[in-house]
Image (tube, rainbow, N blue to C red):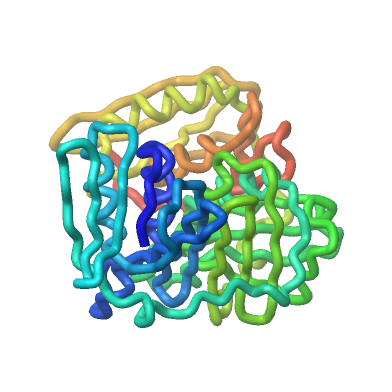
């Protein structure tokens, strides 16, 4: 195997497959990517952690066909440091991958390609075109609530299910907060999700990366897997076999109280009062009174902060505390000039919605804090 390729394109491809490799695995081959050249002038790159598979291709000047595997991380590090625009790669008979550019030469150890796991490309699965902008927006608005793998409050993935109104709803929750985004099923014409599915957090991250610059994509779902294909890249992931909590039970259907605040005013104010918070004192208090929203935060070691925002409100005084990062996270993904905060009492979660972004809802559970 021998080919010559342009550096920028190679860096982009290697960056794309990085997180699909399993860096903590005790199986060495999972740290490697499979590289395969073809006579038609294409080079294929594959990576897997046995749950998430990624395959992509690029054009190159192929001199000889072949395949090998090498460390995906080290290959990227080497290529990044090479100053030349053109790079030559060659697999040798003594289990080495030679990388040359100008007067620089690197050798990487390889593992026989026969040891690389077989990646299922789901050739028999029917894929349907999807609205990439809608899918990207749905993932962006919900990924921040997906818990890390080690957390056990809820399923570490993104719930995707149909609603009674024939929409699709994407839902995430880490037990302290929840976010969902509804989109019309027409954005995924022909896609059938007969039941709910849960997409692992890592796969959601990779789907977002893949959709950053893509305007065309097709999807397919079977009993165990989800597939996303673009003109140059294929991604598949095993779905989580887990139970997602009955999240609708914690969303108050009626919220008798509420205020509206301009996003361009609320977000900077929250950022200001967050300066005196830390891991031990993470809260911001919403003190709501007649025509006034006071944001209050404090730390006995650092000090405290207050910021007052004028609002339209003529109800009873109300105070509640939230993790300030959670509030900032939910507001940052809203595409609306106005943020609406609604509540029932201090025991129920506070609801953040956006009138101009109607498919989105965020719930944040209140914090119990000592009065300062």
Q: Is residue 331 above or below residue 308?
A: below
- Locate the N terminus and report the quarter of the image it occupies: bottom left
Residue 17 visible in the snapshot: yes
Q: Residue furthest front?
A: 63
Q: Find residue 249 and report its image quarter.
A: bottom right
Say which of 133 and 328 sits in front: 133
Q: For the point 74% across and 52% down, which residue is it?
A: 130
Say which of 217 and 104 sits in front: 104
Percent of width and height locating residue 299: 22, 37
Describe residue 18's horizontal placement relative to residue 243 as left or right.
Answer: left
- Locate the C terminus and report the quarter of the image it occupies: top left
Q: Is residue 117 above or below residue 1?
A: below
Residue 346 visible in the snapshot: no
Q: For the point 31% across and 42% down, which residue is it?
A: 87
Say which of 218 and 323 sits in front: 218
How many callouts does the rendering have?
0
Q: For the point 63% across and 53% down, which residue is it?
A: 230
Q: Residue furthest top?
A: 310
Percent of width and height locating residue 117: 42, 79
Percent of width and height locating residue 21: 36, 65
Q: For the point 21% across and 36% down, which residue is it?
A: 102
Percent of width and height locating residue 324: 39, 40
Describe residue 317's horizontal placement relative to residue 358 as left or right.
Answer: left
Q: Is residue 295 above or below residue 1?
A: above
């Amino acid at each position: 195997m021998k080919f010559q390729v342009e550096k920028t394109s190679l860096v982009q491809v290697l960056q794309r497959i990085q997180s699909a490799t399993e860096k903590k695995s005790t199986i060495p081959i999972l740290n490697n990517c499979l590289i395969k050249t073809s006579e038609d002038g294409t080079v294929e790159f594959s990576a897997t952690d046995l749950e998430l598979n990624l395959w992509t291709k690029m054009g190159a000047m192929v001199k000889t066909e072949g395949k090998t595997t090498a460390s995906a991380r080290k290959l990227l590090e080497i290529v990044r440091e090479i100053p030349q625009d053109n790079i030559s790669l060659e697999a040798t008979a003594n289990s080495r991958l030679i990388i040359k550019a100008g007067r620089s030469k690197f050798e990487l150890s390889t593992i026989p390609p026969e040891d690389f796991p077989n990646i299922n490309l789901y050739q028999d699965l029917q894929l349907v075109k999807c609205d990439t902008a809608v899918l990207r927006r749905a993932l962006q608005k919900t990924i921040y609530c997906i818990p890390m793998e080690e957390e056990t409050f809820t399923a570490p993935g993104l719930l995707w299910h149909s609603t009674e109104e024939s929409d699709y709803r994407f839902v995430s929750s880490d037990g302290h907060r929840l976010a969902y985004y509804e989109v019309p099923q027409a954005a995924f014409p022909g896609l059938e999700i007969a039941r709910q599915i849960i997409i692992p957090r890592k796969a959601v991250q990779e789907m977002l990366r893949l959709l950053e610059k893509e305007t065309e994509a097709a999807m397919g779902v079977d009993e165990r897997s989800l597939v996303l294909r673009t003109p140059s890249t294929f991604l598949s992931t095993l779905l989580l076999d887990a139970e997602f909590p009955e999240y609708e039970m914690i969303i108050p259907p009626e919220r008798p109280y509420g205020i509206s605040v301009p996003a361009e005013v609320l977000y900077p104010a929250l950022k200001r009062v967050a300066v005196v918070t830390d891991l031990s004192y993470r809260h911001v208090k919403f003190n709501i009174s007649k025509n006034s929203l006071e944001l209050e935060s404090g730390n006995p070691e650092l000090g405290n902060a207050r910021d007052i925002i004028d609002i339209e409100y003529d109800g009873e005084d109300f105070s509640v505390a939230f993790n300030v990062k959670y509030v900032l996270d939910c507001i940052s993904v809203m595409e609306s000039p106005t943020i609406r905060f609604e509540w029932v009492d201090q025991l129920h979660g506070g609801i953040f919605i956006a009138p101009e972004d109607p498919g989105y809802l965020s719930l944040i559970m209140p914090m119990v804090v000592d009065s300062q």
